Image (spheres, helix red, strand yellow):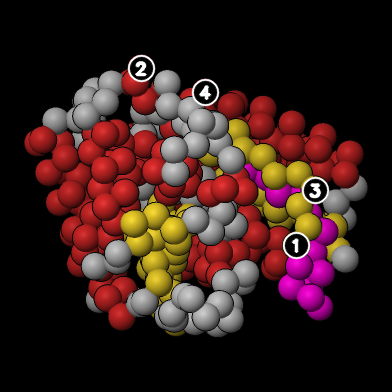
Amino acid sequence: MTRVAAIDCGTNSIRLLVADADPDTGEIVDLDRRMIIVRLGQGVDRTGRLAPEALERTFAACREYAAVIKELGAGRIRFVATSASRDAENRDDFVRGVLDILGVEPEVITGDQEAEFSFTGATKELMGRSDLATPYLVVDIGGGSTEFVVGEEHVQAARSVDIGCVRMTERHALGDPVTPEQIAAVRADVEAALDVVERTVPILEAHTLVGLAGSVTTVAGIALGLEEYDSAAIHHSRISYEQVEEVTAMLLNSTHDERAGIGVMHPGRVDVIAAGALVLLTIMQRTGAREVVVSEHDILDGIAWSLA
């Protein structure tokens, strides 16, 4: 076993996985898996820069993670930064801050690299299951971008497009509840992005849709009727198109306080979950997927495997 620490810093959240990984058996044993909503991508779509307060929230989380990594004695660390820090003019400030705190330089990866990590993390446990047909379409709905990956044992094609839940919420100034005009505008953005994806990724040829990240897992938790967030119950659950449609309609028509009162809802997702659910629903409509297989294992697990 190799003890590793993987950090995924996205537009909305920063997540840590400390785990023992066995490359011979394909097993990852979690020692600590946690998430903090830092909203690093606050305003990036509008200003092109990382806000000072967003950077400080992120650095505070890094200091907490540094203490966990030290306590658990992880010998290898990899810090991967995704959409928001790719887009920002002042990303060097972010890189220097992380390096000072954690001793490793964040890798500001491309969308295609992000997709590779997500696919590995999401599908490693699914390989060989007779009830799930391949190829898989792995969809990772992040804060700033969404990754689409088609593959079987390995990635065949991948594409990242800028239709994350934070970006859609900010770009269209989504109301509370969301108006029909705003819903139409988000849908148009997602459909245009899917046109781009289809040029290089055969999303209509996939047989199993695998959904990742907080928008998808939150929709699943609501659909399952959970009173509080339960990773074990959500991981590998199969949520039908009709369930996704019902949950999305509820979220779009709810107020901030109503969404905040949902048991599985993380406080940091309250104002962006409606957009995330709408992105998922539009993808399912476009691809004809009758269900989504929900995975709690994603880019973090892929990063961990890259270290092991």
For the residues labelled 2 and 3, the Cα–Cα distance comes to: 34 Å
The residue where tag 2 is placed is 257
Q: Is residue 143 left or right of residue 78?
A: left
Graded by Cα atoms within 10 Å as few (under 14), some (14 to 19) or many (20 or more), the crowding at tag 3 reads: few
For the residues labelled 3 and 4, the Cα–Cα distance comes to: 30 Å
Q: Are marks 2 and 3 in contact (CB under 8 Å)?
A: no
Q: Earlier in the sequence, mark 2 or mark 1?
A: 1
For the residues labelled 1 and 3, the Cα–Cα distance comes to: 9 Å
For the residues labelled 4 and 1, the Cα–Cα distance comes to: 35 Å
Q: Is residue 232 left or right of residue 47?
A: right
Residue type at mark 3 is Leu
Determine the residue located farthest toward the left in the rendered image.
181
| Viewer-proximal residue among 32 and 59 | 32
For the residues labelled 4 and 2, the Cα–Cα distance comes to: 25 Å
> Residue 300 location, x and y as percent?
63, 55
Question: Helix or strand or loop: what does disc 2 sit on?
Answer: helix
The residue where tag 1 is placed is 28
Magenta residues, start to end: 14-27
Question: Helix or strand or loop: what does disc 3 sit on?
Answer: strand
The residue where tag 3 is placed is 31
Q: Are marks 3 and 4 in contact (CB under 8 Å)?
A: no
On residue 53, which mark appears? 4
For the C terminus, the quadrant is: bottom right
Question: Helix or strand or loop: what does disc 4 sit on?
Answer: helix
Q: Are marks 4 and 2 in contact (CB under 8 Å)?
A: no
